[in-house]
Amino acid sequence: AKVVAPGHSHFTHLPHNAPHTMEMIMQKSVTAKVVAPTASASAARPAKAVAARASKALGRSTFMGAKAVAPKATKAVRATKAVTTCEGRPWTLPEKAIDADTLECINSIRFLAIDAVEKANSGHPGLPMGCAPMTFVLFNEYMKFNPKNPYWFNRDRFVLSAGHGCMLHYSMLHLTGFESVKKEDLSTFRQWESVMPGHPENFVTPGIEVTTGPLGQGIANAVGLAVAEKHLAGVYNKPDSTVVDHYTYVIMGDGCNMEGISSEAASLAGHWGLGKLIAFYDDNSISIDGHTDISFTEDVMARYEAMNWHTIHVEDGNTDLDALRKAIEDAKAVTDKPTLIKVSTLIGYGSPNKANSHAVHGAALGAAEVQATRDNLKWEYAPFEIPESVYKIMDKTEAGAKWEAEWEATVEEYCSKYPEEGKAFKAQISGELPEGWEDALPVFTPEDKGDATRNHSQTMLNKLAPVIDGLIGGSADLAPSNMTLMKMFGDFQKDTPAERNVRYGVREHAMGAVANALGLHNSGLISYCATFFIFTDYMRSAMRMAALSEIGTLFVMTHDSIGLGEDGPTHQPIEHLASFRAMPNMLMMRPGDGNETAGAYAVAVANRKRPTTMALSRQAMPNLPTTSIAGTKKGAYTVLESKGTPAVIIMGTGTELQYAYEAGQKLQAEGVDARVVSMPCWELFDEQDAEYQESVLPAGVKARVSIEAGSTFGWAKYAPNGFSIGVDTFGASAPAGKLYEHWGLTTDNVVAKAKEAVKTFA
C-alpha cells in the first residue's frame, strides 16, 4: 500500500458528516518511505526502534499532515503505515467536527501555551496542546468557580497533577477571568518574579489550588481535597440544607500513574468512596524516554477498578467533545466511588512534525514548527493575541458571581434554620483559630510522672480536639505506637465522614500529600499525620511540598532515635533531624518533656503557613522544673542558669535534655559555673533578635557542649569547637540503655566533655 499526505489537514474544513482518518483516501503530497504494518505494538522497541516505532503512529489524525507518499504515485491511494517521526500509538479514529467558536477557544488555549513556552525557550507544550479540549469542556461547561474570588469556599477545585504542563492551567486562569494572570503576564512564563512559574505554585498564583511538579503529588493532593469536602459535608450538611457541595477535578498523566504515590492515594480514595473526585487520565502514550510501552504496559483502568474506582474511557480526546461531556456527566452520576476518565489524546496535537512524540513533551517547538503548527491549525493570530470572542465565551466573571451569591444565600438560610451549626460553619471556614485555644494545653511539674513525648503528644491532641473543630488526622497504621487517636471521635470512613481520626494504612507518601491537601483546602482544617521518624524517608517529598507550599501540616513523628532500641538500625533515625533542619520553611521540633511538647503544639497549630515536624520519643523522661511553653516558642532558652557568665554552656534536645540538665547540676556542685540550654527548635531560635540570642548563647563563651541522639551534623553552628556528643554511624539492635552507653549519651560523658571544653578554652 502507498501513502500520501492530505491536501489540507484540519477537520473544521470538512462537512460535519465527513469521515476523516488516516485510513481514508488521501491526496498526494511530499515524499517519504512506506513500510508494512508491524506485527505488534512492541515489535520495534530496542535500539534501532525509532523508525519502526514511529511507523506505528501513522494512524494518528490527519491534522499532522503526514509526509508519506509512495514513489512515483500519481493518484490517490489507500493509507496504511508509514515512517514518521512520531512514537506514540497508532491513531485511526475519525475526527469529529467542532464548531468554529468552540475550536477557536480550544486553539486559544493551545497557542497561549505554545507561545509562552517558545518565548521562554523552556517548558512543556505537548500536554496543553493535547489536553486543551478536555480542559475547555471542564472549565467552560462544568466547573463552578468565581475568578474574581479565587478563595470562594464552595468552588470546585482543579489540580493539574501533571504540573509540567502548567501553561494549560495558566491559560485557563487568564481566559476565564482570573486577575492573577493578566495579558501582560502571558509572555513572562518561567521568568524571574513571574506569576507563571515553571510548575504551578499555590503561594504565587491565586487560582492554583496546590503546588505540583513531582509527579503523583497532585493526584494525592486531589484525594485530600476531596476528603476535606466529604468530611465538612458530613459535619455540616443537613437533609434540607447543603452548604458544602463541590467537586475536585484533576488531570494526571502516565508519569503520575507510574509513581507509587498515585496508587497509594487512589487506594485510599476508592476505600473512602470519594464520589466527588473525578480524575482525567491524559493517556497519550508518550513519556520523556519515548513511547510508554518501553516501561509501562499495565491496564491502568483495571488497576483503578480493582481499587474501587468507577472508570470510563474517552477514546478520542482530541475532537470528541460530546464523549467528554458524557463522561463527566456519568462520573457525577456515580456518587459512591471516585471516577477515572481515561482520555486518549495526541500529545502536541496540531504540530505537523512533533506531535505524538517525546520531542513535544519538554521543549519549545522551535520557530519553524510553531509556524507550521499555526499554518496547520489555521491560527492567524500573533503570539499571545486572543480573539475577543474567546474571552466572551470563556470568561466566568458573571457566572462565578452568580454561583457565589446563590451559595451565600444558601448559607444564610442554613444559619437561620440552624443557628448554632451556622455559627460553627462560618467560624470553621474563616480559618481563624478559636479564642483561647492555647489555654487547653496542660502544664507539667517535676511532680508529674515522667513520660515519653509520644504520650505527651497524645495528651495534647486530646486536649486540643474539643476546642479546635478543624483538627483532623491520623497515622500510617501505627496509631497505637504513634499515640495519635483523638479518643472522643471515631474514624473517618466512607459512611462516617464526619469523624476525625483518619486511618491512612501503610501509605506514608500518600498520607503526607493527603494531609497537606486537607490544609490546602483552605477551610480551616488543621491536619496532622504520623509515623515512625525513620519512615519520613517514604514521605519526604510530601513533607518538602508542605514546606514549599506554605501549609502548616503537623508531622507527628515518633520513635525518634536509637532510643527505640531492639528494632535496630533499620528503624533508628540518625541523619533525619539534620535533614529536616536543612529544609527551608520547616520547623523541626524535638521537645524534651511535657511542657516542651505542649510548646511544640502551640507553635505548630499557630503556624498555618509553615509545617512542623515533631520528633517524639518512645522512652520516658522526667519533667524538668524550668521548661515552659513560652521558652519553647523561642526555639532555645536557658533551663539551668549559671551564677554569672558561664564557664561552659551545655545544649540538649529531646530525651538527652535530661542528661544535659543533670550534667549541669553536677558541674555546678563541683564549682564549674555551667549553663544548660534547651534547643527544641533551631529555626525559631535563629529567628529571635540578636540580643536574645546573645543572652542565651553569649559569643564570648567558647566552651560549649551539645548532646543529641542523632547526627552531630549542624551542631558546629552552636558548638563550633567540636564538643558534640551524638551518633554519626548507623545504630544497632540492643536495649536502649546499652546503645546510649556505647555512644556516650550519658550524664557522666557530658560532664567529662564539659570539663575538657573548659580546660581547652581556659
Image (spheres, grey):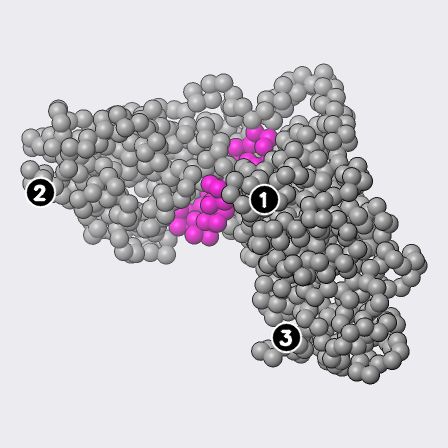
Q: Nearer the viewer, residue 626 or 281?
A: 281
Question: Which residue does the image show at 31% across and 27% down from the upper left?
Answer: 689
Question: Which residue does the image show at 22% across and 26% down from the upper left?
Answer: 695
What residue does disc 1 label?
188
What residue does disc 3 label?
50
Query: Residue 342, position in %: x, y?
Result: 72, 56
Query: Residue 547, position in %: x, y?
Result: 46, 41
| Picture quadrant of residue 691 | top left
Query: In the image, which is nearer the foreground, mark 1 or mark 3?
Result: 1
In space, the residues marked 1 and 3 are separated at their CA atoms by: 35 Å
Extreme bottom residue here?
72
Image quarter of the N terminus: bottom right
Image quarter of the C terminus: top left
In this view, 70 is above or below 696: below
Answer whether residue 223 is visible to the viewer in this image.
Answer: no
The overriding secondary structure of the stretch rendered in magenta is helix
Disc 2 element: helix
Kindly identify the amino acid type of the residue bearing the numbered disc 1. Thr
Query: Residue 588, position in %: x, y?
Result: 37, 39
Query: In the image, which is nearer the foreground, mark 1 or mark 2?
Result: 1
Query: In the image, which is nearer the foreground, mark 3 or mark 2?
Result: 3
Question: Which residue does the image show at 69% across and 33% down from the upper left?
Answer: 147
Decide if residue 41 is on the left or right side of residue 15. Answer: left
What residue does disc 2 label?
760
Give, as a single range, the part of the protein colored magenta. 519-548
The answer to which of marks 3 and 2 sits earlier in the sequence is: 3
Disc 1 element: helix
Q: Residues within 10 Å of mark 2 (few under 14, many from 20)?
A: few
